[in-house]
Amino acid sequence: MDNIGVGVVTSTRLKERYMACKNTWSKDFQNVFFFGGYLQDDNLISISQAGEDYNSHFLKQQLGFKYMFEKNPNFDWYCMTSCDAILFKNSTLNEIYKYDHNQDFLLALACGTWTDTPYFHAIDNPSDNSFTAIAGGGGFFISNSLMKKCYQIIDSFNENWIRISGPNYPYSDVAFAYMVFKYLNIRLTNMPYLLGQPPSHYLGAISGDENTKWYVNFPIPLTEALKRPMSFHYIKPHEMMDVYNKYKS
């Protein structure tokens, strides 16, 4: 079963990256959409309102979701990821189909507690205005039910995000978590197999390097996460094939 729309945020200026995705993991999925900005590239879907720099990630994500929904409003799940990430099909399908796509689900790796007052930033203790942000580099998934609701509010939220985000404007993953929390009162479901770092990062933490402290409260053992990862992030183009072959199931 592969009734998923997968969006990849990229740029015509990042051809080596997006071609590494096209030559490896994206071949495994039936419906993959590579989103670029205003520059024309036959390999990419142009989001004409977006630029080609770091700040463009937000609009490519938001309008990319709208594009996928308009192309097919019947995907079970809609995903957004980056061109320096790997998504593993078998593990992905095994995990996301544990959840009902006819219910409202945002499946993502949790990235701390954030607040929108006085400005967007991470905090240590939850408050009435706090929400759990997404670590979105490794990808996140929206159920069909939730996507139908998001489609109706994305444009108005985009305008609001420009006004309220300040220096956090390019943090598109934080923005999406905030949007569904503030507008729809929906919180993410933590998916620890969506790994937001490369394998070397987690292997180092397992062996006891300086990253160990960040995983004291990780919901599953890192050794378990590495047995069946759904994704990795920050994968360089020359590493993509080796990592893909090593961890695909």
Image (cartoon, rainbow, N blue to C red):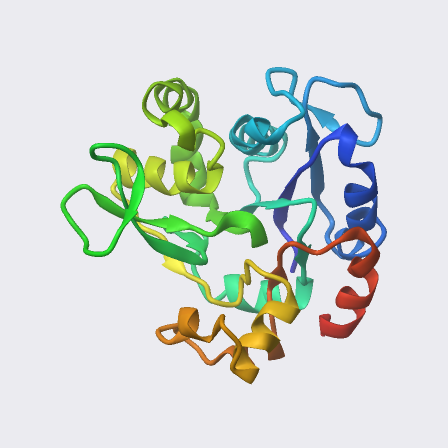
In the image, 90: left or right of 225? right
Residue 210: x and y in percent read: 49, 72
Residue extending furthest left?
A: 128
In the image, 162: left or right of 77? left
Q: How many marks?
A: 0
Residue 193: x and y in percent read: 53, 67
- Where is 103 relative to 161, above or below? below
- Where is 139 relative to 115, above or below? below
Please give the name of the residue rendered at 63% of the width and 61% of the height, measured from the top-left corner. Answer: 232
Q: Is residue 76 visible?
A: no
Residue 222: x and y in percent read: 51, 78
> In what quadrant of the picture does the N terminus appear?
bottom right
Q: Camera-side residue: 31 or 55?
A: 55
Please give the name of the residue rendered at 81% of the width and 47% of the height, measured from the top-left corner. Answer: 22
Q: Camera-side residue: 90 or 135?
A: 135
- Where is 98 relative to 72, above or below? below
Q: Is residue 91 visible?
A: yes
> In what quadrant of the picture does the C terminus appear?
bottom right
In the image, 75: left or right of 155? right
Question: Residue 51 appears in which quarter of the rendering?
Answer: top right
Please give the name of the residue rendered at 77% of the width and 36% of the height, measured from the top-left corner. Answer: 14
